Amino acid sequence: MAIAVTVKGKHLQVTEGLREHAQNRLQKLETYFQNIREVIVVESVEGTQHRVEVTLQGDGLLLRGDMGRFPRRRRRG
């Protein structure tokens, strides 16, 4: 059974490449969690901060995770 993966963008246009990458990575979760029905991915950019939030939903299962990334600043001089 394939997992339904929804990829959304907030202040960001989700390209086909981003969507395919997320779907390919998240389909592998079936190996560990057989009862996942849906995965929702929200990718956002606010200023210089990039964030990805993932929500897994299934029979009696709700997992949420997020990760933010700040770009590295260059050292001057």
Image (cartoon, rainbow, N blue to C red):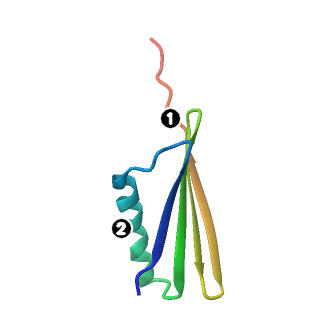
If the image is split into quadrants, where does the N terminus sit? bottom left
In this picture, is 16 found above or below 59?
above
Q: Quadrant of residue 66?
A: bottom right
For the residue labelled by badge 1, is the local secondary structure a helix, a strand or a loop?
A: loop
Q: Is residue 14 left or right of residue 47?
A: left
**Residue on which disc 1 sits:** 71
Q: Nearer the viewer, residue 55 or 74?
A: 55
Q: At x 53% / y 76%, what residue is drawn?
A: 38
What is the x, y in percent for residue 54? 56, 63
**Amino acid residing under circle 2:** Asn
For the residue labelled by badge 2, is the local secondary structure a helix, a strand or a loop?
A: helix
Q: At x 65% / y 77%, what residue is drawn?
A: 62
What is the x, y in percent for residue 77? 44, 11
Q: Is residue 60 left or right of residue 32?
A: right
In this picture, is 33 found above or below 70?
below
Of callouts 1 and 2, the N-terminal one:
2
Residue 24: mark = 2
